[in-house]
Image: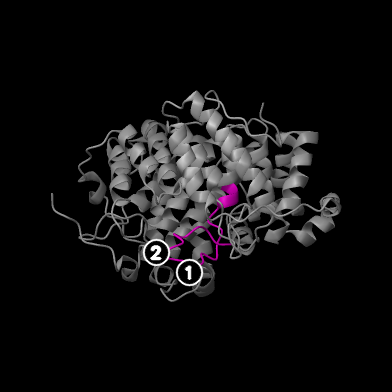
Amino acid sequence: MATARTIHLSIEDSGIFRSNPRPDSASKASNLLQEDMKSHHIFFNESGFHNHTVHHILSIFALGASPEDIQAAFDRAADYQRPALPVNEDIVRKLHNKDEFKALAGKRDEYPHFLQFFQQEVEAKGIEEVVNEYIFKGDEFADDMFTRMFGGQYSCHIEIQAYSNARCTIGLIHPFIHLGFGLEFKQPAIVAQALAQTAVHEPNLKDFFVATEKEAGGVGNTGKKTLVELQNECRANSRLRDSAHWSDTSKVFDGVLKRAPNEMIKYASQFTVGPDQTDERLAELVNAVVYYTGAAQNPPKKIKFDFFYIHCVNSAIFLPVFVSQSWISQRNKQRLLEWKGRMDLLTYVSRACAEPRINEITDYKPIKSWEETFTTAFANGREDGHAAKLMRVLAYGEKLCEPYADRSGFPIKDDMWLKLSNMVADSIQGPEALWIRSAGFPEAWEGVPERVAH
């Protein structure tokens, strides 16, 4: 039985998209994720790179990976994880005081104390009450945590070998992703991990989110523009398009939000979700980020996907997970969708508004089935879960967006989903880096080989 301290997976609770998950893989994944929680820190180095073990193993389990595939994925990640830090029970007790909690929030070495605290909270109150209290309550304390869930100062895993000194300086929505996995796979322990991870991120995007919500006139106004329209308008605005520079340490904070904050707020605030728009806007959020991520290509360079853009895609699969929870209020569901759309726009602009070339998708010649593309992710010795997550979203998005295929704001349709999964599978082959970073800049494509004619 899954509890706040025990991870127990089953094929019955194997995600909103699954491809023949195996009972023996559920057992293997449960044991390894339990070991990860017991033995490893949530950040695998002093710079704050995220431990992706939970994301990776749950994704490939859902996609039908064998126990051997799952063990291999775990072993690759375990080689570079930091050991878990000891827990001081006196500190854990202090976290019940909101002032003490706030004083320790944002400090990543406090993660084990926050984990123990949230395990106790979930044991005592259950997932629903705890997540509502600490994320969705709407008071100053919960809003601070809600903001932290969308990112923070700490780095993501950036291909250690090639980018050992690189930093994202933005959390790439990892706490949101982790909480989504916990809810999707019905694992209280992973929910506790996610809340602890949220607590040790910084609310660096608070000013942006507060300003856009104010500019939008609050939460839940009927949206008039699609996310794709807003992407196009951002790209057409030269001040916004050129606000991030290749030399910026953080293209979000030193670029967009420093050089064009008013313009970014103006466009981001126009993405709103009215009371009767929830389902369509949810599907649109998936479609729009898949569009700008998949179409951000640079012929004749080999097909590659932008590492920052794919996080917008990989996090999108959890939107229906949150929206399907009856215990989350309608207002909070609308707010979550609005903030996610605004985050997606900010991320798009921060990579220089990469020009979308949709013909790169429509003209692609797929040769693999869905299952065959999944297998390429299982077999890749350098893959840490990002490709598997991306493929899972694409497979789910095909079904989610089908009812809206004829509507504006849904450029990805029909066989384009499978073509994109083939593009991902092909892009991670070869000795070069798996991903590019900041696709709208020519410099990002240096070192990427040209395509080989078939």
The residues tagged by marks 2 and 1 sit, at their Cα atoms, a distance apart of 9 Å
Residue 254: in magenta span = no
Look at 20% across and 42% down and name the residue there.
365
Query: Left or right: where does residue 36 sit relative to residue 436?
Result: right
Q: Please determine whether, in this image, residue 361 is positioned above or below residue 352.
A: above
How far from the left and from the top, in percent, is residue 289?
41, 49
Q: Residue 246: horizontal and vertical position, in percent?
A: 41, 73
395 relative to 11 in the view: left or right: left
Extreme-bottom residue of the structure: 247
Report whether residue 241 is seen.
yes
- Circle 1: element type: helix
Q: Position of residue 126 (x, y in %)?
A: 74, 33
The residue sitting at 39% across, 40% down in the picture is: 378
Segment tinted magenta in the rendering: 154-176
CB under 8 Å between callouts 2 and 1? yes
> Which SS does the magenta portion mostly show?
loop
- Quarter occupied by the N terminus: top right
Display coloring = one colour
Q: Which one is earlier in the sequence, the residue at label 2 or at label 1?
A: 1
In-front residue for pair 278/381? 381
Corner quadrant of residue 303: bottom left
* Residue nearest the viewer, comparing 170 with 380: 380
Residue furthest left in the image: 454
Q: Amino acid at mark 2?
A: Ser
Q: Which mark is residue 14?
A: none
Identify the element where label 2 is drawn: loop
Compared across the picture, whether 404 is left or right of 339 comes to left
Name which residue lies at 27% across and 50% down. Answer: 358
The residue tagged 2 is 438
User: Residue beneath label 1, please?
Assistant: 251
Q: Is residue 226 visible?
A: no
Amino acid of disc 1: Lys
